[in-house]
Structures are given as structure tokens and as C-alpha cells.
Image: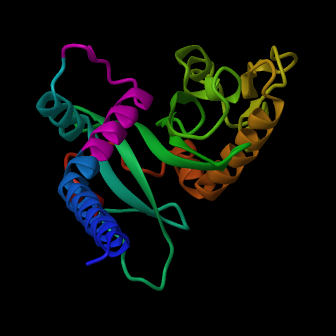
Amino acid sequence: MSETRKALTFAILVAFICCLCITLASTGLKARQQKNMRLDRQKNILKAAAIGYDAKKVSEVEIKALFDQHILQVWAGMDGVLHPKPLGADVSYLPLYLTLNGGQIVSYILPVDSRGLWGRIKGYLAIDADGITIKGFTVYSHQETPGLGGEIESEWFQKNFTGKKIVGKSGEFVSIRIAKGKALGDLDNVVDGISGATLTGKYLSQGLAANLETYESLSLRFRQNLIKKHVENLKDLE
């Protein structure tokens, strides 16, 4: 066998072994990756719901226990009526989470999926059971520029949302807006923006408005006290 053929055979063999190793590693790590993603989302939902815990001391088991104790995943029809699960593929149902305290609904959490400057921004927005007041906001996935738009994942930015309102003075839906810099004027519906990240704030404002408008029928039912506030389990929604 010539030296060239030997080299070519060796290269093909090495490439095959590398591909095999990568495939096996990817397959073996998939379950762990999915577990970590699920845990990260549970942490973000708990944070948005203002369920406090010491992140440095709490274990994965304790996170799951807190989540199971306080968070209940449900679905909302386009009419705002809650259901324990989607009722057929021909009707649109919106996923959301209820925050429970002693069986009492204290807030509801909707997923956020917004355009960003460089990619999608995903997170959670918690709204008080009054259907008006924001209780918390978190981001778990984004591709914004570190130090600029990437500040949307920082504690100081996310805390700006707490206490803000999604309705105007007359009770009409207005969403929540991120200012270009320091929020001025009507502060009930505006949060401080990030210096140098005007487009990130603009796109996230638009995304939040679109997401909140989609869930407005549900929020209106909360504002009108049409939602049963005591829910101990999924059967209570039926």
C-alpha cells in the first residue's frame, strides 16, 4: 500500500472515530441538557413569581419541591378561561403558570418570546392576581450584546418591572414600555432603559406588548374577578 493511500485511510479512520465520539457524546448528554434546561426555566419562573430562595445553597431537589409547591401549569383559551390541559388541536390554547400560596392564586406567569437585536429574547413575566400589576420579569435566553443589550438579564434591569402596571389611568390595556434611558413622565407603565441599547429596548417593548395583548382576555378576567382564586389542584379548574 502506498504512503498516500495509508495516509488517506488513516485520515478517514480518524474522522470516523471522531464523528462516532461526537455522536455518542451528544446522545449521552442530551438527557442531562434537557434536565438542566428544565431546571433553569423552573428557577426563572420561581424568580419571576418572587418565590425567594438562596440560589447558592438550594439543591435541584429543593428547587423542584418549591416549584411543585407553588407553581401550577395550566392553559388559557382565547376567551381567557383556564383549563388544566388543551382541549383539542383545532383550538388555540395559551400556556401559563399560576403562582399558588395555600391554594390561593397570587399571580399568573406568562412566557415571553420577543424579537431582539440579534435573536429571540425569551423569559417570563409574572402579573399579580389583580390582572394589573407586574410582580416580576426574568430572561433565560437571549443573544444581545454583552454589556449593552445583554443587560436585560441583569438584576437591576429586571427589578425595574416590579410594581409597574399594564393598564392606564382609566383601566385600559397599555402594556409596558422600556424607555430609551431614564424613564420620564407616566412611570406606571414605563421602566428605565439601558444606555446604548435603544434597539434592544424597542424590540423587547414590542414583544412584551404583543405577548401581553395575546393574554389580555385572561388578564381582563382577572381584573373583573371572574377567575376562581382558590385552586388546590388541576381538577379545581374543571
In depth, the one of 95 and 35 nearer the eye is: 35
User: Residue 176: image x %, image y %?
Assistant: 71, 35
Residue visible at 25% across and 14% down in the picture: 56
Q: Residue at x 14, y 28 (%)?
A: 62
Res. 71 image quadrant: top left
The quadrant of the rendering that contains the N terminus is: bottom left
Count of marks overlaid on the render: 0
Q: Residue at x 76, y 33 (%)?
A: 201
Residue 94 position within the rendered picture, expressed as x and y whole percent measured from the top left: 48, 62
Residue 18 is inside the magenta segment:
no
> What residue range appears in magenta?
36-57
* Above or below: residue 50 compared with residue 2: above
> Farthest front residue?
2
Q: Residue furthest right?
A: 185
Q: On the image, which quarter does residue 84 sit in?
A: bottom left
Residue 103 can be seen, yes or no: yes
In the rendered image, the vertical position of residue 169 relative to residue 3, given as above or below: above
Q: 87 left or right of 214?
A: left
Is residue 52 part of the magenta span, yes or no?
yes
Asked if residue 99 shows in the view, the reply is no
Q: Report the coloring of the rendering.
A: rainbow
The C terminus, quarter of image: bottom left
Closer to the camera in the image, 50 or 155: 155
The front one of 27 and 3 is 3
Up-down: is 220 above or below 16?
above
Instruction: Classify residue 176 as left or right of residue 132.
Output: right
Percent from the top left, x then y, of residue 90? 47, 86
Going by the image, does 48 lie left or right of 157?
Answer: left
Q: Position of residue 224 (x, y in %)?
A: 56, 46
Q: Residue furthest bottom?
A: 90
Q: Residue at x 22, y 58 (%)?
A: 21
Q: Is residue 83 left or right of residue 149?
A: left
